[in-house]
Amino acid sequence: MSTITFSHVGKSYGSTVALDDVSFEIQTGELVALLGPNGAGKTTAIEILLGLRTPSDGYASIGGELPRSLPARRRIGATPQTTGFPDALRVRELVAFAAAHYPAPVDIDALLAAFDLTDLSATRAGDLSGGQQRRVALALAFAGDPEIVVLDEPTTGLDVESRRRLWEQLRANTGARRTTLFTTHYLEEAEALATRIIVLVEGRIRFDGAPSEFRAAFGHRRVAYVDARGERVVCDCDDPDAYVRELVRNEVPFRDLLVTQPSFEDVFLHLTGAAS
Amino acid sequence: MISPRLIGVHAGSILRELSRVPAFIIPTILFPAMFYTIFGLPYARTSPQAADNVLCAFVAFAVVGVTLFQFGVGIATERGRPWERYVRTLPVDAETRLSARVVVAVVFGMGAAGLVAVLARTLTPVSFDAVQWLTFALYALAGAVPFVMLGIVVAYWCPPRAALPVTNIIYLLASFAGGLWVPPEELPRFAAIISPYLPTRQYANLLWSIASGHGELAAVAALCGFTVVFMALATIGYRRDERARYA
């Protein structure tokens, strides 16, 4: 049985359509990146998955249970929105509070260490910096050692070191009996981490597949350099290596050569059919 | 399904949080005892009957305060902050969380009312025997139920930021007009007219019946009536909020 099922899920707020006929199944062990620009419906999809919203059409289920049911919630760990911890509670108390809800929670000290929170365990939530709050929020998702971890924009606001640790944590957490779903704006992050990428655009699924397929579909690179006249040349191409070799072979004078991945916005434009 | 263990977890968390906010602890626990000392004590020392009546009135004042603040302001505050959204993703049901608030209210209520009772017992000629003290504790607890519901009404019908001032106004006006600060027969005319229609007055009547031996049934009936009405309003408010935030 699939761990997570979305079957023809639609969601409207009044006349605004947030999700339109969204269907996917996620199996145990997958590490799924839900990718999309702002307003694509990522948050609504996550909210439905967490039982915070109910679909207007279709249904969602966690291991065959409605997301709002207790059995479903026992299998999921999620992150809170960062800005809203109860100020007077200490970091360790917040983590222990979350852990207490699950049948077999993790070792709290180990979890605090994994998120570099050991020194902050007695700090009140109200005294944490933004980055520290982010780390506490992420730790909470893992506190119950749930089968499914759902992270909404997990690396937003994290420094490089914390981001690296989180990636490690996600890779270690996903496996035989663990499933992870995270949303992100960053294509690079989705490609580096996920075993599967689902792209939402304007409430609809526009891509669902492995990162390699994603790269094949939208894998062009952007080559940019400054030419002899001092003008910036930009070229999108499928094989940047060949392009650069070509430049060298033809002795094109260039400097400040830059090869970049398209930003998600570029892919988004590509997906929606606008000029890229 | 209500989980006793999670009731403990949630009650512990609320207690821990509140105990770190002096602005909450001091008014709820100490104000009733302070008011008792300032306004009740001089009269309470005049006779055993006066001592009994003043004790009942100020214990009612203490319990109503704790209950309204816990369920009104407490739930309203919770409902307004983003943390609530996270707690709702945890495997815990609404009944367990409400039960945790009941535990917290009982703990604070025992503190606030207990302080008044200790003052009354040591400084005034209270006539209660052991059975009456027990009945008193039981009535004080049971009579708090409509105020639990009234608190929830405020929590869901007021915007979260308005809950505190609204609760304060209801609490103070209903305490005064309900005869909790001055005996009902000494209330100004207008207050005396509305007094019998207030849940605070009926709550006091219930407690006063322990010493006087009459008025018990009427008070119970009235408090049940208030409970039903407030519960209906609370349910409507709760459902409306659920629809708006989590539909």
Image (cartoon, coloured by chain):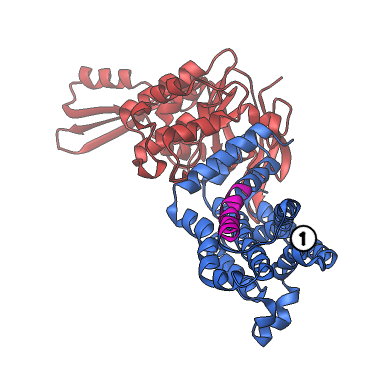
Give me the residue at 73% from left, 66% from top.
B208
Answer left or right for B22 relative to B70: left
Q: Position of residue A221 (x, y in %)?
A: 36, 27
Answer left or right for B229 relative to A141: right
Q: Position of residue B180 (x, y in %)?
A: 64, 70
Towards the viewer: A30 or B3: B3
Q: What range is drawn magenta here? A: B106-122
> Which residue corresponds to mark 1?
B227
> On screen, A192 above or below B230?
above
The majority secondary structure of the magenta stretch comes to helix
Towards the viewer: B152 or A69: B152
Q: Is residue A192 visible?
A: no
Towards the viewer: A203 or B125: B125
Quadrant for residue B51, please give it. Answer: bottom right
All told, the count of numbered labels is 1
Towards the viewer: B89 or A176: B89
In the structure shown, which secondary structural element does the residue marked by tag 1 occupy?
Answer: helix
Q: From this viewpoint, which residue is outermost toward the top?
A: A176
Give me the residue at 60% from left, 15% from top.
A177
Q: Colour of chain B?
A: blue
> On screen, A45 above or below A2?
below
Q: Is residue A199 visible?
A: yes
Q: Position of residue B28 (x, y in %)?
A: 53, 58
- For residue B108: magenta? yes
- For residue B118: magenta? yes
Q: Amino acid at mark 1?
A: Thr
The chain containing the residue under callout 1 comes to: B
Tell me which chain appears red. A
Q: Position of residue B157 (x, y in %)?
A: 65, 63
